[in-house]
Image: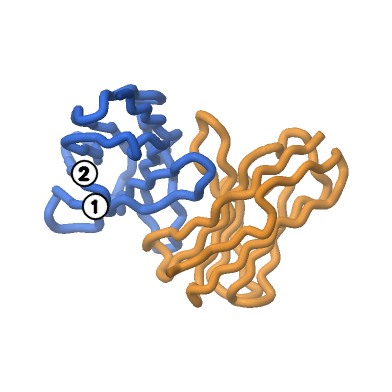
Amino acid sequence: DVKVTQSSRYLVKRTGEKVFLECVQDMDHENMFWYRQDPGLGLRLIYFSYDVKMKEKGDIPEGYSVSREKKERFSLILESASTNQTSMYLCASSLVPSGELFFGEGSRLTVL
Amino acid sequence: AQSVTQPDIHITVSEGASLELRCNYSYGATPYLFWYVQSPGQGLQLLLKYFSGDTLVQGIKGFEAEFKRSQSSFNLRKPSVHWSDAAEYFCAVTTDSWGKFQFGAGTQVVVTP
């Protein structure tokens, strides 16, 4: 069974802290994505990656960075967390760029 | 500007009744269209997708959707809902080869006994 695993389901951080959200997929997918989910706004794309060490900005990249050192792992980094980054973060992967997205269960981040 | 609209934020339906969720898009080219479902505390799961061909597509869990180019719509339907269909449903659209999807705001479905 395909699997996208997000290491932290719930995190509470303080303003200004550096935050790492980790995502691992076991499907050998080339493409990985980070989305942010907020009520009434649906999912918004933060960053995506089509290959190791490759990244592209999505629709809301400000305040975030990403790292993809290995094919199976895609990390989202908040260099200095702010309260407006309190949200649900969803990682996804896909075999082909416009194909089915496989999602992790999400990481709910609260920034105090 | 490209957009995806799910007009209904919240729908309440009785168990056994039919369900229709609306999705409208605004894109220049014919898009690839998807419906995903998110159960409480879970990630999103693909219900069905449309790339080309027959405009009526069948998905998992007894769902179907119809692509209507003239109305720029891709509405999701189920003839008889089950209590387990209570979830949030998202329409997603892409037109580019990079797979940059645009998601609708979601429709929360509540199923009553």
Label 2 sits on what residue type? Ala
Tell me the distance, in whole angstroms, between the alpha carbons under discs 2 and 1: 8 Å
Q: Quadrant of residue A13?
A: top right
Judging from the image, mark 1 belongs to the subunit labelled: B
Q: Is residue B83 left or right of residue A105?
A: left
Q: Residue at x 55, y 59 (%)?
A: A33
Label 1 sits on what residue type? Gly
**Crowd class of label 2 (few under 14; some 14 to 19; many from 20; radius 10 Å):** many
Colour representing chain B: blue
Q: Residue at x 70, y 66 (%)?
A: A67
Residue denoted by label 1: B59
Structure colour scheme:
by chain
* Nearer the observer, B58 or B28: B58
Is there CB contact under 8 Å for labels 2 and 1?
Answer: yes
Chain in orange, by letter, is A
Label 2 in the same subunit as label 1 = yes
On the image, the x and y values in percent for residue B51 come to 25, 57
The earlier-in-sequence mark between 2 and 1 is 1
Q: Quadrant of the C terminus of chain B?
A: top left
On the image, the x and y values in percent for residue B111 come to 33, 28
On the image, the x and y values in percent for residue A99 come to 37, 63
| Number of numbered discs overlaid on the protein picture | 2
Tell me the mark number nearer the camera, choosing from 2 and 1: 1
Residue denoted by label 2: B65
